[in-house]
Amino acid sequence: MDRLSTADLNAMEKDGFVASLGAIYEHSEWVAWKVAEQRPFQDRAAIASAMRMAVETGTDEEKLALIRAHPDLAGKLARAGQLSESSTREQAGLGLDRLSDEEYERFSNLNDRYRERFGFPFVICVRMADRSGILSAFEQRLGNQVNAEISEALRQIHQIAKLRLADLIGE
């Protein structure tokens, strides 16, 4: 993937800007649309901050849609090769695409329990975790209240976005 500069992004037409940053927040181009008019940005950190603020000031429906846009960890879509390019790379980096049948069943069970409890998928920044940490977080977070879990899911999503921006934008 070719890295862009902040200057490149600032100089793009709005459609190009959105096309370049639309996947930073999983299947949620609306975040890039909201910040496109705020250009020029000083640096990658300013873009990350603006995108984070766009999410945080979004409606409850937009926030839930963003959380729901994320795939289950090591879920059926992953096994079928139907994740976004970024999600595929992130889950593969932790070996979640190569689980044994027993491990897959454990993740599936936790995904199902979590989704049943909260109505959205479990989201964690896999690039900042290991398998045992993810499984521990699954178990611990199943005890959260819904509002606390929405906040935690959004916190994890912002971390994912920050890392994706760092992959895409050089300074």
Image (tube, rainbow, N blue to C red):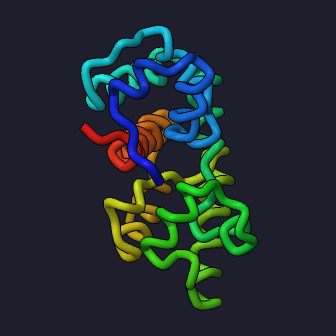
- Horizontal placement of 15 versus 44: left or right? right
Image coordinates of residue 8 in percent, x first then y, are 40, 28
Q: Quarter-wise, where is residue 52 in the image?
A: top left
Q: Quarter-wise, where is residue 73 in the image?
A: bottom right
Residue nearest the viewer, comparing 125 with 46: 46
Judge whether 88 appears above or below 95 on screen.
above
- The residue shown at (46%, 43%) is 153
- Horizontal placement of 93 versus 102: left or right? left
Image coordinates of residue 124 in percent, x first then y, are 44, 54
Image coordinates of residue 59 in percent, x first then y, are 58, 17
Image coordinates of residue 159 in percent, x first then y, are 36, 44
- Horizontal placement of 102 versus 136: left or right? right
Residue nearest the viewer, comparing 115 with 126: 126
Residue nearest the viewer, comparing 82 with 62: 82
- Horizontal placement of 24 versus 43: left or right? right
Judge whether 155 appears above or below 78 on screen.
above
